[in-house]
Amino acid sequence: MTPVEMSANLPEIPPTVATGTPAAARSLSIFQKRVRKFRALKRGYYSFLLIVAAYGLSFFLPLLVNNIALAVRYQGHWYFPIAQYHPAATFGQQTFGEPDYRALSQTFHSEKSGNWVLLPPYPYSPTESLLDLPGDPPNPPSWQHIFGTDDRGRDIFARLAYGFNVSLSFAILVLVISLGLGGTVGAVLGYFGGKLDILGVRVIEIWSSLPFFYTIIIVSSIVVPIYLPERNLVLQPSFWLLIFILTAFDWMGITYYLRGEFYREKTKDYVAAAIAIGATDRSIIFRHILPNSLTPVVSFAPFMVVANIGALVALDFLGFGLPAPTPSWGELIGQGVDNLTKWWLVFFPLAAMFITLLLIVFIGEAVREAFDPKEYSRLR
Amino acid sequence: MTGYFVRRFLLIIPTFIGITMAVFLVMNFVPGGPVERQIMRYRMAVATEGGVSGGGTNAEIPQEALDEMRRYYGFDKPVYTRYGLWLWNVLHLNLGRSYVYQDPVWDVIKARFPVSLFLGFSGFFLSYLVCIPLGVFKAIRHGSRFDLLSSLIVFLGYSIPGWALGTALLVLFGGGSFWSIFPLGGFRPSDWEYLNFFQKVAAQIHYMFLPVLCYTIESFATLTILMKNSLMENLGQDYVRTAYAKGLTERRVIFVHALRNSLIPISTGLGSEIGLILAGSFLIEKVFNIDGMGYLGYTSILQRDYPVALGILVIASLLLLVGNILSDMIYVIVDPRIRFK
């Protein structure tokens, strides 16, 4: 959706003069105006910046929250374990496999031999079981493990941080795929109409009468890896399978919206003009009508992200979600319900989910206000 | 219009067949079905009885026994035959026999009906009872301090699913680490039969307080905002201006003229609520260990108890389908402008 097209298609909006030098004055497109309005709604705009920043940062989590050292200075040599694997023997540790960098750091520190280890700021991995802590896991919050550990001794803060990335990535991917699929189907049904439309709506009707969550659980309980012989690939029940399942139910809402929008838009003059100059169906659908019919979709996209995160957490909670070692909020809540005396298993993941969803709801409110404003004139 | 609804009811048939066929097929590809479970159980029994010398997992089940077992569970026939048989039985109101409980599926489900109905209806009434007045008040006092403050609660409702709130409430008030005010779960106390009427009422409220609260939260935000926006939209209409112009009191304009029309979108939700009453609460039932229909569905999937899982699907999807049609009917009744063809 380019701003130029939008302004071209909506001539009824009076051009406004942009603030700036008079020489550079030109009209603002409606899209630019909406973005400006969105930026003026501080609560939503700052929530948006916060979520984008946190999500961007979460891709660098291996550098921030991890048990693998960023850099090691050992006997005059530099090592960068975060980029390249070094066996424990390299640093004189008596174990096999990955060195214990936290222990190494302490050893070097007490030896005072000029060797040192640069650990990530929060030196625990989300999948590492810390069984050397006093007592049995789950361990309560302490200075080392600010949110405590779960029932397998894994650090909860680390799992929540990685879980944020997983949850948001999941929700956004489901949204994008649903938009693509639902958008295309809705556009085609609305634009061509007729028998195709009747048939399509019937199919969607059948599909949407499925008891949504119950069916998802039945499908997710498939735990068998599916072997695809021609591609020599084993399809594990995984992140992508779950995305596929959720998308299969999510796209219908978008289809309904876009179909309605297309029905309304296709009778307008600019479409007639496009047909008159001989534009192809594809060009009319995607270049002319689609940018004009995205408003309702844009304004409910944040709420779909909220719903997707909620669905993922619920599935993880029931044990039908992402495969086992994946850091997930719902799985922690599930552990908490089984260990009711261990309050930190429930409260911290709930807080993480709540804050994330609240910020996205704020974004959603602001987007709706900016893109689809409803002016209520109260008469007295 | 009668023709429209007759067609809608007839459409239930292909929809129902589509839904059940899809799920039936999926269930047939899920490993760990009843036959596999029986084999596992047999092997474990052999392993424990025979001890170390018994040969453990090498014990093979004789082919005849295996065939017998397949026949017992109906797995000796191809999928489409089995689906046809199952559908035929469902048409005769026979949902089969549970693998786990060894009882007819209908009896197993029927026993859970009252529990889910109780939870569903009380949550449903409570949410309408709270949300409609709140939404109306927010609309009348749009922009006031009360509106802004209650909007905060609405935002909270949007951002936390009811069942998730339930886990927090359970930790807080279930006597784990903090206060011990409410029971840890369950539908009724174990000494239910010996209680007199008032004790029963008290016990039921005690047990159902948290679950019903969570159930209410689930639809709180959407319902309140729907009510508010709907009333605000109507208050800007010409007929409201006319009502004011002819000198009606504000109370009369709002509560007699505007409110009636703004209840239309709310009332259409009633139909689909019927489907949700039974199927929508199973996360809450799981959190609070309430042995209702939703929880039964969850455990039946876990235990691969196909007849029960399918039976619940049948009931839930039929309720959903009928509920949708009911929604449209209510729509026609409350809004005479609507015409379906």
Image: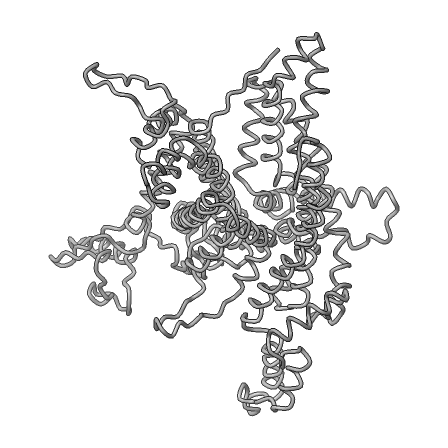
Q: Residue at x 45, y 70 (%)?
A: A225
**Residue A355 visible somewhere in the drawing:** no
Q: Is residue A235 left or right of residue B142?
A: left
Could you tell me which quadrant the N terminus of chain A lies in?
Answer: top left
Tell me how the rendering is colored.
Answer: one colour
Q: Residue at x 28, y 70 (%)?
A: A96
Q: Is residue A199 left or right of residue B17?
A: left
The x and y percentages for residue A199 are 54, 52
The x and y percentages for residue B225 are 58, 30
Q: Is residue B195 left or right of residue A244?
A: right
The x and y percentages for residue B321 are 67, 51
Q: Nearer the viewer, residue A266 or A289?
A: A266
The residue most toward the left is A76
User: Measured along the vertical axis of the image, is residue B63 above or below residue A315?
Assistant: below
Q: Nearer the viewer, residue A38 or A69?
A: A38
The x and y percentages for residue A243 are 44, 55
